[in-house]
Amino acid sequence: MLEGLLKEQIRGDPVIADMLAKYKSRPAFFYQKSPEDTASGWSKPCYPRADYNIDMRYDPERKASGALTINAWCTSESEFQPEDIERRLVALISGTFYTPPGGATISAIWSSSAAFDFEGNTSDGDNTAPEVFGVTIMFDLLEFPEQITTTPDPVQALNIWSKDLFPGATIIAHDQMPEVWKPSDMNPAIYWRFDGASADDRQSYAVDWYIGTFAAHVVADSVTERNRWIKALVETIQLEGEILLADRSPMFAQRIAIRHDADPLRVGQLLLTGKYGVLAQQRRERAENLLSGPFGTFGAIAGNGAGTSSDGSDGGGDTPGSPSSRLNDFSGNPLNRAVFPTLGNMEVSAHGKE
């Protein structure tokens, strides 16, 4: 899980390992709560130390999001201060992608830091215990779920197209992701997110047309290189004009918008509008067509017309073309029975009365 990946990443960093105290010969970085100061596993001294907690919540767009909270604890006698630990933790965690086995990729983004003093500190001059204080570091967590739906899928096509265009880039939710990974200028992250779609007014017999919008998130180490990757994406889409879907049908690029001021992890800097077609399913016969046939509409069938013969008699039965005959023919059709199940129970005589 995410908490295990984070713990191994921080404990495995030699810089943090040198800053933190040791507990059972491992850097003092704990999930939720640190052991008591009197526990036998502590080295001397037992500060600095750090603990962390993860809170996840449902997100309608990202499926899940949440917050990572890290508390770094120091004393007035510690060699390293909270600011030193904070700086290293932010450098390690912010912008890093975590992919638990069998789970979706999650990225952490530093949001804020706040200093604190331990409530057990006292101003009594006779107290020889060192003062305990620290810093709380907050990170936002964003999930990057797989966006693939049904064939032909535009997001799947954009993932394949991006990988063919930039083999050195890592396509999130498409490539096999390392458990802990951070993008670089030479190996950026690209993530295509389905933003929305609407049906086009233009329909054909064989194809239903849709207009979709797709956001591209491009993450690199520096702003300069990130903008260079975005520019290459936009120019290539503009030149080619289309992206081939899995069934080899085209999605036509209609509009491309670049938002350099957008957050690359939360929003995405590129917004593509494309038009693509899906093979139409077999058309269902409309209800009004079911009500119209060789015997006229249901209104004519249920009318009050007289079915008498030319000699004035009632014909002694269902005369062809009479209301009763037409009703029987209409209700005998299984399609009409499905629409009007009560027709089989109706009886109309040649005189239009029971």
Image (cartoon, rainbow, N blue to C red):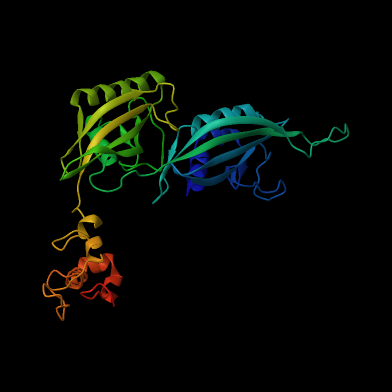
Q: As rendered, which of 297 and 261 lies closer to the eye?
A: 297
Q: As rendered, which of 121 and 306 lies closer to the eye?
A: 306
Total number of numbered labels? 0
**Residue visible at 41% across and 49% down in the picture:** 103
Could you tell whether 58 is left or right of 292 in the image? right
Q: As rendered, which of 315 and 230 lies closer to the eye?
A: 315
**Residue visible at 20% across and 27% down in the picture:** 241
Say whether residue 160 is visible. no
Residue 353 position in % (x across, y down) = 28, 75
Residue 246 position in % (x across, y down) = 19, 43
Rendered-image quadrant of the C terminus: bottom left
Say whether residue 231 is visible. yes
**Residue visible at 50% across and 29% down in the picture:** 91
Q: Residue furthest top?
A: 224
Could you tell whether 319 is left or right of 176 in the image? left
Q: As rendered, which of 143 and 199 lies closer to the eye?
A: 199
Residue 327 position in % (x across, y down) = 21, 70
Quadrant in the picture for residue 258: top left
Quadrant in the picture for residue 250: top left
295 lies above or below 111 = below
Could you tell whether 19 is left or right of 300 in the image? right
**Residue visible at 19% across and 68% down in the picture:** 330
Residue 244 position in % (x across, y down) = 19, 36
